[in-house]
Image (tube, rainbow, N blue to C red):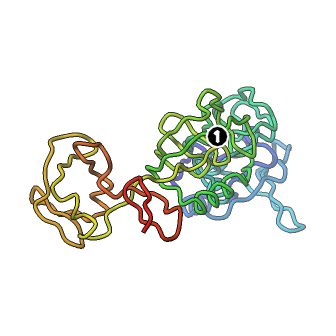
Amino acid sequence: MEFDNKKVLTVFTKNEVNKGDLGWFSDTPYELKQAVENEEKLSEIESINKDNMAAHVFIKKHRDCLFLYRYFYPAPYEYLQEQWVKENDLKVGDRVKVTREWEFEEGGFKFAYDGSEVGSIHTVVEIYEDCIDTSDFWLPYYAIEKVENSYNEKQKKWVEENNLKVGDKIKIMKSWGHGEEGFFYCTSHNKVGKEFVVNYILDDSIDTGYFRVPYFAIEKVPEEYRKFANAEEFKPYRDCWWRAKSGGSAFDIDSYNDGGVRFLNLSYTYEAFFDAFVNTDTGEPAGIPIQPIENVGTTQVRGKVSEN
């Protein structure tokens, strides 16, 4: 940390700190500068000597003994928040609870108490060097605590069990209340029964690109197609024309084998082909329709089941 001699406190500026403030103590400017620049362990002010004639005014407690020092260098708010964020492993998306109010410039925090209700829970959207932003409020680290959200673990388990991936279709089965089962994003009553594509899978929600939904209010829509497995499966489609999902000109296949297809001097595995292209005539994905075999001893033929 860079040392700023203007921040060194003495008997003449002792009123700028309070009991409980954290920083570095010393009796010599050199030792104080070394302690700050090396970011040595912080200590807490136990009390301040009120005698204006005394040179040693900053009192630190070590075990059961009290020690008095000439100089005190208060740790900057930014440094203290950085340490707290590391110790608590705070990340964007985590939930925090407001534990108390605070005074303007308390502990070096430059934002006044903004009315955030004590006990209220908010989601961290950004961690700046001088505050923790929840989009609703700018909060100081010392007035919040990290809230462990069991919702995140439940969603992670559900995503794994259902093999949910970005690009999958989901159907919204019900609306939900704010805070229900630890999910804190707004409900969408008018979207029940509608299908959407998964845009992102976040720690605390599933994002459709339009809004976020909880795992307990959705179901995964079964896939209708899968990639070609080999050249034999692709063979009936070799004369079809294809185009990219994003649009563009149609093309036919130059060659194919068990590994994939080749066209326009480019090679694609069947998986990459399935992910990026569609049939120009039908708009169907570049793959095989998935249809359940309902009875043993039957043959499945694209939507029809006939007896062997």
Of residues 264 and 102, the one drawn nearer to the viewer in this rendering: 264
Residue at 53% x, 52% y is 3
Residue at 57% x, 39% y is 212
Describe residue 189's horizontal placement relative to residue 115 as left or right: left
Residue 234 position by quadrant: bottom left
> Dot 1: what SS?
loop
Of residues 235 and 114, the one drawn nearer to the viewer in this rendering: 235
Name, please, the residue furthest toward the front.
307
Name, please, the residue furthest toward the right.
64
The spot of residue 279 in percent (x, y) is 25, 47
Is 81 situated above or below 15? below
Q: Which amino acid does the dot numbered 1 rest on?
A: Met
Is 192 situated above or below 288? above
The spot of residue 44 in percent (x, y) is 77, 55
Residue at 15% x, 62% y is 262
Is 227 situated above or below 100? below
Residue 104 position by quadrant: top right
The spot of residue 195 in percent (x, y) is 52, 38
Graded by Cα atoms within 10 Å as few (under 14), some (14 to 19) or many (20 or more), the crowding at tag 1 reads some
Of residues 55 and 6, the one drawn nearer to the viewer in this rendering: 6
Q: Which residue is mark 1?
A: 173
Residue at 42% x, 65% y is 299
Is 294 situated above or below 49? below
The spot of residue 136 in percent (x, y) is 64, 30
